[in-house]
């Protein structure tokens, strides 16, 4: 277990954790949002972020501070906390972003780490190389090597109590991301940003984001605190948390406000297109869209930024509550409906169901089957794995109907889509207590048929009969030939 991070609650790959930040003497509850503060222009003051929005941590850019004579002097003299007037934890970025945008920067990892330490940063960042998506394998490998050298330099630096992050790069090569995660995990660094995903998010490539995070997580292991660097849109937080991300940073709240854009958990809207606000934050209840449009530019920007932050923090709270209640996957399913590319992200998340299953609690409150994607959730994967360990009598009836009278079979198990067969004694245990719609879908039936197939596979000598409620032929094809079939709807 990493000393600075403790996991409290789990749901799918998501977790509520505590990140101890010793230099700030605070504990940050994760998933956490780090609002990005541009030291040159704060749309919402850090003090207000703490008091009004409950921000426990923020992020600012040490490279910008380092490069500005006035800011540098103030930061060195007063320290970051006094300069920004922020009581929580302060993370600093290193200029890697500027490196990726402008091709070069003027500091080394040693210099910028020392500077971050001198100005009182609580979590510092070395200068890694944010390799963009889709580059050649050679470039991705070469730049990853440089990033890894920088992490080793950071490991050797005298950073005292300051935590130091270890960015995980590797472009869109899952094996490189995984290897980068493993390397970062072996250092004694503390927080693990998955880097260079902004270009993917800007192109709505949420499926690729999920693959990249899943690969990094495989390398990092379960107990590493993971930061999805540059992810600030609340629409995708639930998906990213379910994948196992703990920290997010948002510049979006301010950048979007500057362009008159209004954030919602279902996407971004142009203020000019809104007739009614779908939000009950202080801004949206005090103003109509017309009122807001009529405000002077700077006031409108500040009010929009405040709304954007409210909706962003609210989503983080909603996600934490969903983890506590054990229904994070249902929240992800809802969010996936906001945009076809989010649905791609969710479907890709389900490709990693076996990976999520490892951290998913064995028992939770309820399993709601709310879309055909539910048939691929980690709980279904787990049940299918479990079927291999159940002992089966010589002759067994699997039925969607009632238990048979008489002694034609040694035993009869229930069959419930999407899980498939299970002994009646398990009927009251999670997830077999699932709420499933009466008008079931093909995906649920197919998953149930796969469950039957799994059971037959490991018990080739058992005599198995399946009594089903009129499953279509295309579903029954998934059931092995030696299973006797009874159609309960045929009589
Ligand atoms: Zn609002």
Image (spheres, rainbow, N blue to C red):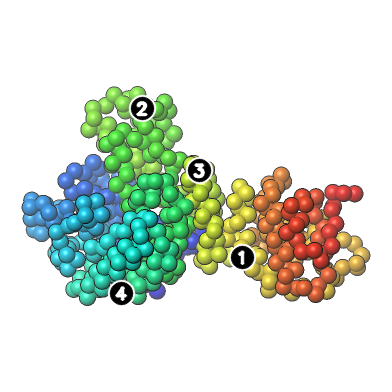
Between residue 247 and residue 326, name the one nearer to us.
Answer: 247
In the structure shown, which secondary structural element does the residue marked by tag 1 occupy?
helix
Nearest to N terminus: mark 2 or mark 4: 4
For the residues labelled 2 and 4, the Cα–Cα distance comes to 49 Å
The residue that disc 4 covers is 188
- Rendering coords of residue 234 (x, y %): 40, 46
The residue that disc 3 covers is 340
The residue that disc 2 covers is 272
Tag in front: 3 or 2:
3
In the structure shown, which secondary structural element does the residue marked by tag 4 occupy?
loop
In the structure shown, which secondary structural element does the residue marked by tag 2 occupy?
helix
Nearest to N terminus: mark 2 or mark 1: 2
User: Left or right: where does residue 474 sit relative to residue 99?
Assistant: right
- The reply to whether dot 1 and dot 4 touch (C-beta < 8 Å) is no
- The residue positioned 84% from the left and 49% from the top of the image is 489
Between residue 490 and residue 324, name the one nearer to us.
Answer: 490
Tag in front: 3 or 1:
3
In the structure shown, which secondary structural element does the residue marked by tag 3 occupy?
helix
- The reply to whether dot 3 and dot 2 touch (C-beta < 8 Å) is no
The residue that disc 1 covers is 382
Q: Is residue 423 above or below residue 52?
A: below
- The reply to whether dot 3 and dot 4 touch (C-beta < 8 Å) is no
Label 3, residues with CA under 10 Å away: few <14, some 14-19, many ≥20? few
């Amino acid at each position: 277990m990493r000393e600075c991070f403790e996991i409290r609650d789990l749901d799918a790959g998501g977790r509520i954790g505590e990140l101890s930040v010793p230099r700030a003497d605070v504990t940050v509850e994760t998933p956490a949002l780090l609002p990005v503060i541009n030291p040159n222009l704060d749309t919402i003051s850090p003090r207000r972020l703490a008091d009004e929005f409950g921000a426990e941590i923020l992020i600012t850019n040490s490279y910008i501070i380092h490069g500005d004579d006035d800011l540098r002097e103030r930061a060195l003299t007063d320290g970051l906390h006094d300069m920004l007037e922020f009581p929580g934890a302060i993370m600093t970025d290193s200029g890697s972003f500027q490196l990726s945008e402008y091709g070069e920067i003027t500091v080394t990892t040693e210099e910028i780490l020392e500077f971050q330490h001198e100005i009182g940063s609580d979590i510092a960042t070395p200068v890694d190389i944010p390799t963009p998506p889709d580059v050649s394998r050679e470039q991705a490998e070469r730049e990853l090597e440089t990033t890894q050298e920088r992490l080793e330099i950071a490991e050797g630096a005298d950073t005292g109590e300051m935590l130091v992050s270890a960015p995980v790069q590797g472009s869109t090569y899952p094996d490189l991301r995984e290897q980068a995660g493993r390397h970062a995990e072996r250092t004694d660094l503390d927080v693990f940003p998955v880097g260079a995903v902004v270009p993917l998010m800007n192109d709505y490539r949420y499926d690729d984001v999920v693959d990249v995070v899943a690969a990094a997580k495989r390398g990092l292991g379960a107990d590493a605190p993971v930061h999805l660097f540059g992810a600030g849109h609340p629409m995708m937080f639930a998906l990213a948390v379910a994948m196992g991300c703990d920290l997010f940073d948002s510049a979006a709240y301010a950048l979007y406000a500057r362009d008159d854009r209004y954030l919602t958990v279902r996407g971004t809207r142009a203020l000019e297109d809104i007739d009614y606000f779908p939000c009950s934050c202080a801004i949206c209840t005090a103003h109509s869209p017309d009122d807001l449009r009529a405000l002077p530019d700077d006031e409108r920007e500040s009010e929009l930024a405040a709304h954007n932050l409210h909706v962003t923090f609210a989503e983080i709270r909603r996600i934490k509550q969903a983890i506590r209640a054990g229904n994070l996957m249902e929240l992800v399913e809802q969010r996936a409906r906001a945009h076809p590319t989010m649905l791609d992200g969710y479907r890709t998340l389900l490709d990693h169901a076996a990976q999520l299953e490892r951290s998913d609690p064995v028992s939770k409150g309820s399993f709601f089957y709310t879309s055909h994607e539910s048939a691929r959730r980690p709980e279904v994967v787990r049940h299918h794995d479990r079927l291999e360990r159940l002992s089966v009598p010589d002759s067994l009836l699997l039925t969607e109907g009632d238990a048979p009278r008489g002694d034609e079979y040694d035993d009869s198990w229930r069959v419930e889509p999407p899980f498939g067969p299970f002994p009646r004694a398990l009927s009251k245990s999670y997830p077999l207590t699932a709420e499933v719609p009466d008008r079931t879908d093909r995906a649920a039936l197919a998953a149930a048929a796969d469950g039957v197939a799994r059971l037959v596979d490991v018990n080739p000598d058992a005599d198995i009969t399946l009594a089903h409620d009129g499953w279509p032929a295309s579903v029954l094809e998934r059931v092995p030939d030696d299973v006797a079939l009874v159609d309960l709807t045929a009589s």
